[in-house]
Amino acid sequence: MLRSKLPAVGTTIFSRMSQMAAQEQALNLSQGFPDFDPPAALLDAMARAVNNGGNQYAPMPGLPYLREQIAGQLLLHRGVNADSDTEITVVPGATEGIFCAIMAAVGTGDEVIVFDPCYDSYEPAIQLAGARAVHVPLSAATFSVDWERLEAAVTPRTRMLIINSPHNPTGSILTSADMVQLEALVERHGLLVVSDEVYEHLVFDGRQHHSVLQYPGLRRRSVAVFSFGKTYAVTGWKTGYCVAPPALTAELRKIHQFVCFVAVTPVQQALADFMAEEPGYPTTLAAFYQAKRDLFCNALKPSSFSITASAGTYFQLLDYSAVTRGIDVEVAESWTRDNKIASIPVSVFYQQPPDATYLRLCFAKRDELLLEAADRLCKI
Ligand code: PMP
Ligand code: GLN
């Protein structure tokens, strides 16, 4: 009766581990979301938006006022000019934006290069578009791009490359040298890029985020995808935006208008109001999350785990090889059950999992919870 379009796909690791954490009453450092409140002024803006009648459909590409705020922020934080009418589209979450960008730009017979470990939503979208994902592993330990391996993976069928910096699940980031190499490669081969930049403001130790929007050769060929969920600690509001040249934006909107049609109106109004009030808010995030990363990593010092502090995102990898040689999926499950601490196994993000022993822990949590989690981990 029914032939599955995604026969290999089950329930995502994020849903499974969060569910297991709830069942086992474990500290949930698995799925990435803050356990603290968003800024009070943003919550007030949301209440105002709902109470002031912003409860019907917004225009399909997003509220003009929000798109203007986004354009302002792109200029302020990245020095990038983007036309709010023809290049910015508000979407109900980065997941939808990525899906629409892939659907809009690739089709049957095309190949799309992704880097492993690879965020879980890319490949299903590629498959549903009729294309094929070609997985290129990031270098072991540093999780950086192996340029020779990438070049070797490009074929005449390659149409698109998906990048994600800062990188989930490893916390690595692309450097400016990487971006220059990437720009040359996509121009040489005429490729499109989907650039998942949802953690753009979460970069640590004085590092810089490099957006595809800042490199002319990439800007021409890319859809950059952002999420308000990460920047404003409102993952449940499921709102983000895509920035792409007009022709790409037009194709993306054709898909977006029939997947969701519009993003949620009062959320857009509230975000726009808050962005207008506090345009500098995103610049506070790096120090805020770096302090959490440092608190967590320092508290883990007495443990036997090997830890390289994350360069970006709100995730920290932990190498458990000195403690157990178990398979990461089983280790994550047993820690949730027995030690009451839930994490995400990294092997599930690979087509061919390496012999690696990493778990990902989310540090977007209150300090007390991070210290309690570290205490439990130190006892393993
Ligand atoms: N890309 C990456 C790398 C993510 O980590 C996430 C979400 N956590 C998303 C995309 C999706 O973001 P959203 O919740 O806005 O759909
Ligand atoms: N992106 C979030 C994470 O990496 C999860 C979002 C989801 O559950 N789809 O943890």
Image (cartoon, rainbow, N blue to C red):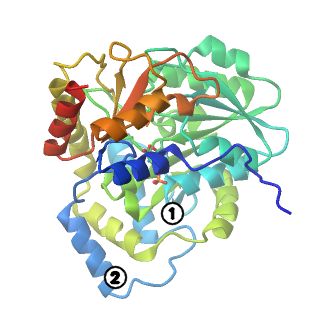
Q: Residue at x 63, y 63 (%)?
A: 256
Q: Residue at x 52, y 61 (%)?
A: 91
Q: Amino acid at mark 2?
A: Val
Q: Residues within 10 Å of mark 1 (few under 14, many from 20)?
A: many
Q: Amino acid at mark 1?
A: Pro
Image x and y of residue 362, in percent: 32, 39
> Disc 2 to disc 1, how far (Cα)?
17 Å
Please name the residue that numbered disc 2 is placed on. 50
Figure check: 272 above or below 107? below
Figure check: 348 above or below 41? above
Earlier along the polypeptide chain: callout 2 or callout 1? Answer: 2
Please name the residue that numbered disc 1 is placed on. 92
Q: Residue at x 42, y 37 (%)?
A: 333
Quadrant placement of the C terminus: top left
Image x and y of residue 325, in percent: 43, 16
Quadrant of the rendered image containing residue 47: bottom left
Tally of marks:
2
